[in-house]
Amino acid sequence: MPRISAKHQITLPVEALKRSGLHPGDEVAVESEGSDRIVVRRLSRSPQAGLGVFDGLYEPGYLEHLRSEERA
């Protein structure tokens, strides 16, 4: 029977993972559903979800400025 370690970690049983279709490397969300239930859900990442990852990395117009210097 799995137990929660002192570092708040738990090892999930292989059979439960097989039935769920979860694999090593999958990103998951862990949520509490009441006082005695924790749910692990696979995060579905679409390519669209990653498009905004670089928002705010550069000031507006910075990349255009660099490109104009390359052309000069």
Image (cartoon, grey):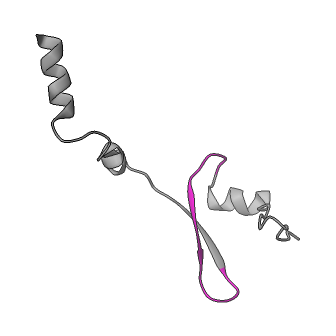
Residue 24 lies within the magenta run? yes
Residue 50 drawn above or below residue 15:
above
Residue at position x 88%, y 71% from top? 1
Q: Residue furthest top?
A: 72
Left or right for 44, reference 27: left
Residue 57: x, y in percent?
32, 42
24 and 17: which one is in front? 24
Q: Residue furthest bottom?
A: 35
Q: Quadrant of residue 37?
A: bottom right
Residue 21: x, y in percent?
62, 56
Residue at position x 77%, y 68% from top? 8
1 and 57: which one is in front? 57
Left or right for 40, reference 3: left
Stretch of the chain drawn in magenta: 23-37
Residue 39: x, y in percent?
62, 73
Residue 13 lies within the magenta run? no
Residue 54: x, y in percent?
33, 43
Residue at position x 38%, y 49% from top? 46
Q: Quadrant of residue 72?
A: top left
Residue 36 drawn above or below residue 16:
below
Q: Name the main secondary structure of what is drawn in magenta.
A: loop
Residue at position x 28%, y 39% from top? 58
